[in-house]
Image (cartoon, helix red, strand yellow):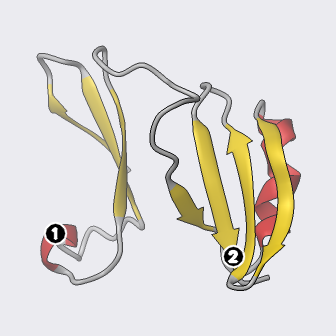
Amino acid sequence: MTTRIFPETNEELTFFPYNPDVIQATSGRVTGVLTKSDTNTPSNCGALIYINTSPEIQLILDKVEKAGGKILEPKTSMPFGFIAVIVDSEGNRIGLHSEK
């Protein structure tokens, strides 16, 4: 679900996971928000945020290039599972993690 809450900046927010019956801020769950506004600029430098892609990282990597993104670091085994780094179609660098 996309919501506009700050019309002065034309900001759009997309909540995940989205459930209209749950107040995310008080749910105790791990959640997130993607934002888009006139004041934000995509970036491939800065903080690298990792997104949990469970159950299997390869399912997501198979979609990256088809969606206009690029794989910067392929699926790599670590003691805690697998990671990869991509650039999305807007130019944001994003880390991925899963157990498989």
Residue at far front of view: 79
Question: Which sits in the foreground, 18 or 28?
Answer: 28
Q: Quadrant of the C terminus?
A: bottom right
The answer to whether 26 is drawn above or below residue 34 in the figure is: below
Question: Which sits in the foreground, 54 or 2?
Answer: 54
The spot of residue 56 in percent (x, y) is 77, 76
In front of the other: label 2 or label 1?
2
Tell me, for residue 93, which label it has, or none.
none
Residue sitting at x 14%, y 22%? 7
Q: Label 2 neighbourhood size at 10 Å, few (<14), some (14-19), many (20+)?
A: many
Residue sitting at x 82%, y 42%? 71
Q: Read off the residue under disc 2.
A: 98
Q: Read off the residue under disc 1.
A: 25
Amino acid type at mark 1: Ala
The spot of residue 86 in percent (x, y) is 72, 44
The answer to whether residue 19 is left or right of residue 53 is left
Amino acid type at mark 2: Ser
Question: Which sits in the foreground, 72 or 5?
Answer: 72
Residue sitting at x 28%, y 16%? 39
Tell me which label, 2 or 1, sits earlier in the chain.
1
